[in-house]
Amino acid sequence: MNFVDEIEVMAKGGDGGRGCVSFSRDKRGRRGSPDGGDGGGGGDIVFAVDGGLATLFDFKFQRHLRAGRGKHGRGNNCSGARGDDLVVRVPAGTVVTSLDTNEVMADLTMPGTRFIVARGGRGGRGNSHFATPSQQAPRCAEPGTPGEQHRLRLDLRILADVGLVGMPNAGKSTLLAAVSAARPRVAPYPFTTLAPHLGVMHHGDEQRAVMADIPGLIEGAHKGAGLGIRFLRHLSRTSLLVHLVDPSGQDESAPERNFDALNAELASYDATLATKPQVLVATKLDLAESRQRLPALRETFGRRGVTLHSVSAVTGEGLEELVSLLCTMVARLRDSQAGETADEGPSGRRQGPRTGHEPPRPDENEGLAAK
């Protein structure tokens, strides 16, 4: 399976180059004033968000990231060249966490964002900087400083508006394929989906929403049962959840019990998931058993104050109404979140230039999300 959503890497910025000890010479070869140049600064390791990537699979073969080191200074006040930056592409939704401090360094969600994860070292000064009236021929220079080194954990959390949850074989992949151009694997057995899939729903000319199909959960998932909670992190960015239940009785379980069990699993993993808005949908209306049991099931959930919607991804019954409802809810949630963000003000922070003799780097961590 090529879908990788969590991986650990080592990032090492380039070391700075050494300063040079050198003296000018006249035409007779006699030594003159010190003219040792500075060493070049080390290169940075930069993560650049690429909207075309959907997995961290490339990092399986590149666990050690190292930027170029700075060149050493030379005589005649020649400074060494700066080391090459290492620009690494990452998918949108990547969370960068330092394993040394267990702190989140960046949450990279916007395509085009660039973030420096390991800075290069500073180049050392040549002996021309150490000349004084009392010491006119210094024979000392600074070594370059080492680049930053971090152990990092990269977590991919896919960006979607709507998350599909439900027991295995509840019809999540079939629904995603019916309302979008996505083509996930569909088969009549549990755990067909082994990785999240994304699709885009459209309603009218303007409304659209991204839907994510999360591999099926079962009771006890937070303890590692089934596929466990490996993919639940992908629901953290969704605005709302669509909870699918199968009323056909093919799995010989009660839909209301499955509904309660999965909500308990969501709460066990992250309490905020259980508080997200949910739309409850009964699937497989094309089966006679489902249509026969639907009235009683709708009444059962109605007593709880939960509205039960029903669809058939095979015949298309109820799909247009469901897509309209979801796109409208997503649009309202986006407007609400945009208003809250405007009230809080900008949280991104751009760092100032470096100190020392190196020139500032104007594009450092531009577009960095709030830590």
Image: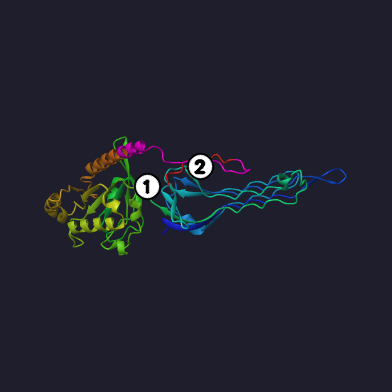
In this view of the protein, which residue sits in the foreground, 272 or 205? 272
Element at badge 1?
loop
Q: How far across and how far down the image is residue 203, in percent?
A: 28, 38
Q: Quadrant of the N terminus?
A: bottom left
Looking at the rendered structure, which numbered label has been put on residue 159? 1
In this picture, is 205 found above or below 164? above
Mark 1 vs mark 2: in front: 2
Q: How far across and how far down the image is residue 231, in percent?
A: 35, 56
The amino acid pointed to by label 2 is: Gln
In this view of the protein, which residue sits in the foreground, 198 or 336? 336
**Mark 1 crowd level (few <14, some 14–19, many ≥20, 10 Å Cα):** many
Q: Residue at x 27, y 61 (%)?
A: 218
* Quadrant in which residue 27 is drawn: top right
Looking at the rendered structure, which numbered label has been put on residue 351? 2
Residue stretch rendered in magenta on the structure: 335-359
**Mark 2 crowd level (few <14, some 14–19, many ≥20, 10 Å Cα):** few
* Residue 4 shows up from this direction: no
